[in-house]
Image (cartoon, helix red, strand yellow):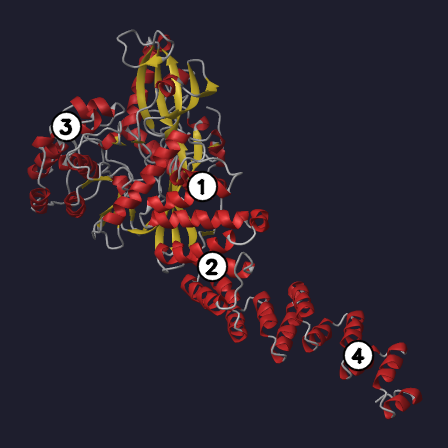
Amino acid sequence: MQSFGPNIDALLSAGDLRGAAVALAAQGELTRARELFERIGDWSRAREIANTQGDRLSELRIALRSDDPQRASELVAALHTAERTLKEQAAELCERERAWSQAATLRLALHDIDAALRLLQRAGDHLAIARINEQQGKLQAAVQSYRAFLAERAAVEPVAGQSSDEYLAALRGCARLLLRSGQAESAIPLLQAARRLLLSGDRDAWRDARRGALSGVESDLMECFFSIDEPGLAERVFAQHMRWQTDAQPAGSAIEYLRRRVQVSGAALAASRERPLLLGRYRLGRLLGAGSVGRVYEAEDLCSGRRVALKLLVLAGSSSARASALYDRFCREAKTLSALRHPKLVQIEAFFPAAGVLALEYMAGGAVHDAALPLSLGRVRRLLLDVLDALSGMHAASVLHRDIKPHNLFFDALGGVKLGDFGIASLKDLGVTQTEGLVGTLAYMAPEQIRGGVLTTATDVYGLGVTAYQLATGRLPFAGPDFLTQHLHSPPPDARSVLPDLPQPWALLLLRMLHKDPHERCQRLDALRSEVAKLPVPEGLTRSGPEPIPPATPERPAPDVTTALAAPTDTERAEPGVRIAGTAHSEVFVGTDALAGRTVLRERFASARLHSDLGAAQLTWLRQLAALSGPGLQRIYSIQPTVAAPNGERSSALPSEPAFTEVEFQYIDPAASVSLAELLPHERAQLGRVLARLRHAGVTHGSVQRALARTSGHITLLLHACGPLSWPGPVEDPDLLEPSTIPEKPHKE
């Protein structure tokens, strides 16, 4: 071992450790100097030397031994970006020194969550444990840790507006988790305690520093009161909230205030392509469906560990009146589902009114609408029995569904069917006259629903009859696009025109379920169920006409969005929308269908352009394609001759020569357009199936090269600004190609 030298030896012999340390530092022997400074407790000089050496482990040890937690925490934080080996050594050092909190911080940086939680448990840091459990989605464990922290601090926590931010954060954090777990009643006392602490003491002190926290607490409190069906208490909190929040945007009521929060959160969600964790509870998965006002995601509920279907309301871009109507409808669905419990109804898991989020039972088999049609008669019979069981439970509670259709029927994992989507159902509906305008989906709507007549059990039977006809034959009984006229006046077709071998009991039952007069339909569901149970189910039925084509892909098509909400205003009727394109024979607009509550494309043809053989062919072409609606084909909602009213508005009711004909199409973003050359192999196969469906019906598209869009992962063949009027000359089936012959590169025609 190297000698210290005569002077240093003398100093050590004399017991002058400080002098020896100073001499060693002067000679550049920093490590020995640091060790001596540590022995005599001169932590400042020892830490200074360790810092000079860049020895972060020694500096951390000195900070821990000198009882300097602030410096130790600073050093631990600086080690977050260090290499893994150094972090592991630092964590082991902290554990040896029994610095549990700092060791836990380093274990978190090493992503060793279990070790960090064990260390924090030894440190008694319940608040940190709660936050980690919350981040990890262990919500019940987080609630327990929050409660342990609050119980520990309650006896010593200052009052009169001086409570620590940690205590207030724990009160609110625990309350939010309870609210999101459906325990609003347990959350209310915690939020009230947080509110009292924020409002007590010197108001000037909290006015700026704690105004945001107070706003959040009172908003959560209002949501809790609405969740337990105490709107009066929510309004009382709102009145006080608006008195304190003098700079807040005015709102007339608590529910209006919460609606505004829904609109903001919905807009943020709509703008986000990826939102992995929602409400601190739901880990979002794939998108199951999307419409003009909402989206449905598959999600994992971290609270229960179950999969759910998460329905998210998006109100961005809606007018105030429409946003209010949509929010009311959304809340009505939650209230209806909460009041109904039946094994054949999709069950509600949780509801968050302020966030505009509804968690529903996840149906593993997907919507019936997504299945390849037609179904076998055996499956149709089982489906009818399941839905009739669901309707019996609903009608016994005086609730009508009013929107029975394949989109609202869902297969469970065992092939059974449950009834869902209660957005336009309402409590105590039986026997009342509909006053909301058209409510329901036009293709499945009963005549009395269209007329605004008295709604009874027979109203749902009609929708079920349309659904059963479609599932058994692969076609709607009324193909549209003028569904209103057809449902009101056209006699229901005999299903044997499509299935000649269909047993007579099936054909007669479907005709009776589709009777125009509700009194002639099946009024008693128990009797109807008995009749369905006796229906024969032969195999190998012969079909008349072209065989219906299965869906193009196993992916879910865009959900049906033809549900009407309320009658449009005169102004909304008059405006076609914003012009985005024009052809030699028409103009194309983007607008809003106020009746159906959706964005649409409108193509307007001047009547003079249609007064020719080619114009007649255009109308025939449009009607044929409207009847062929299905996956991969842009929908046609209506074809409406329209005249100009004296005030310049448009009208479809004046007995005059039409000024123009307007066709309403499904809206597809122009940015989604793709060329034939851009299609992937599976997309070419999808397109081939769509063209095969047209070929079976004897219809030519004629403009495939310039009418393709990629939407929701599948290819859609566009119909607007297409058709005979746009063809340059005679078309000899340029698009009626076998899937295998669709070229991978564009070619000259």
Check whether the beta carbons of the residues at disc 3 and disc 4 lie within 8 A of each other: no
Apparent side of residue 186 relative to residue 216 in the rendered image (left or right) = left
Q: CA distance from mark 1 to mark 4?
A: 60 Å
Label located before the other in sequence (4 or 2) = 4
Label located before the other in sequence (1 or 4) = 4
Relative to 90, does residue 236 appear above or below in the rendering?
above
Element marked by disc 4: helix
Residue type at numbered disc 3:
Pro
Outermost residue to the right: 6
Relative to 569, does residue 81 appear above or below in the rendering?
below
Q: CA distance from mark 3 to mark 4?
A: 98 Å
Give x and y (percent) for residue 165.
55, 58
Q: Say if residue 627 shows up in the picture.
A: yes
Residue type at numbered disc 4:
Arg
Label located before the other in sequence (1 or 2) = 2
Q: Nearer the viewer, mark 1 or mark 4?
A: 1
> Residue 193: which quarter of the image?
bottom left
Q: Nearer the viewer, mark 3 or mark 4?
A: 4
Around disc 4, counting alpha carbons within 10 Å, would you say few (fewer than 14), some (14 to 19), or many (20 or more)? many
Please give the label number shown on residue 171. Answer: 2
Residue at label 4? 34
Residue type at numbered disc 2:
Leu
Q: CA distance from mark 1 to mark 2?
A: 22 Å
Residue at label 3? 492
Label located before the other in sequence (3 or 1) = 1
Residue at label 1? 261
Element marked by disc 3: loop
